[in-house]
Image (cartoon, helix red, strand yellow):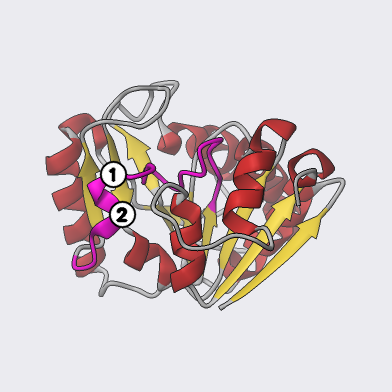
Amino acid sequence: MTVELQVLEDPAGACAAMLLGPLLAGGEVVLTGGSTVGRAYGELASALRAAGRDVSEATIWFSDERCVPPDHELSNFGLVERTLLRPLAGLAPPAAVRIEGERGPQEAARRYEEALARAGAPPFDLVLLGLGPDAHVASLFPDQPTLSERSRRVLGVEEAGCEPHVPRVSLTLPALAAARQIVFLVTGEGKAEAVAAAFGPQARPDPHVPASLLVDEADEITVLLDPSAATRL
């Protein structure tokens, strides 16, 4: 397992650059939601427009989803659609396989696991994740039973561990850890303690720090930080 920490003035731009390669190569990419990644998706859309390349062979999956309709302001798919897919309209954008959160956590999880199986359970080329202030990853929250799941790739999460308190659907730790590369994009001083707990020199696998469990299982992780998020390292 290798963790590379990069402290950058423009981590969103670096994130967009890392996503560009797998999409141009027709790869399998997992995207996430949250306030930090929207700018990265916008920059990625600009780079893909500039390249003028057909990326319809690439597929976008999702790390997790809130159980809301796709046009809801809390929808992770909705964020990706607004910032990445719509700007690429007419340019052969990547396929996007969304989690149908509006069906509820258990049914949506079952259907997404079936969608992955129909696609041959593809190995993800790159998984992009954020980090919660409580060090949660995707929708896997501290000390919840979901962290112990090892046989399934997708789970319904009935109770979110932080706001917004709506049920979720999430890829499991083994599904995330199997990716060829995992990239975290983390900004802001409010995430500094979580960054240190998950990735710092004293970090150890701890179910109270979900991201630390992923570090223990994955092969390669890159953490893109702004200076504020790195203040406790």
Residue 22: image location, x then y, percent: 58, 69
Give me the disc on residue 147: 2
Dot 2, crowdedness within 10 Å: few (<14), some or many (≥20)? Answer: some
Residue 132: image location, x then y, percent: 53, 38
Q: Is residue 133 one of those drawn in magenta?
A: yes
Give me the disc on residue 73: none
Q: Secondary structure at mark 1?
A: loop
Quadrant assignment, res 189: top right
Q: With 197 as the anchor, is 230 left or right in this view?
A: right
Q: Say which residue label 1 marks.
A: 144
Q: Nearer the viewer, residue 124 or 182?
A: 182
- Looking at the rendered structure, the kind of residue marked 1 is Gln
Quadrant assignment, res 183: bottom right
Verify CB contact (< 8 Å) between mark 2 and mark 1. yes
Residue at 41% x, 63% y is 176
Residue 101: image location, x then y, percent: 26, 35
Q: Secondary structure at mark 2?
A: helix
Q: With 17 as the anchor, is 38 left or right in this view?
A: left
- Looking at the rendered structure, the kind of residue marked 2 is Leu
Q: Is residue 6 one of those drawn in magenta?
A: no
Residue 213: image location, x then y, percent: 44, 61
Question: Do we see residue 29 in this rendering?
Answer: no
Quadrant assignment, res 123: bottom left
Q: Give the residues in magenta.
A: 129-151
Q: Quadrant of the N terminus?
A: bottom right
Q: Nearer the viewer, residue 143 or 19?
A: 143
The prevailing secondary structure element of the residues shown in magenta is loop
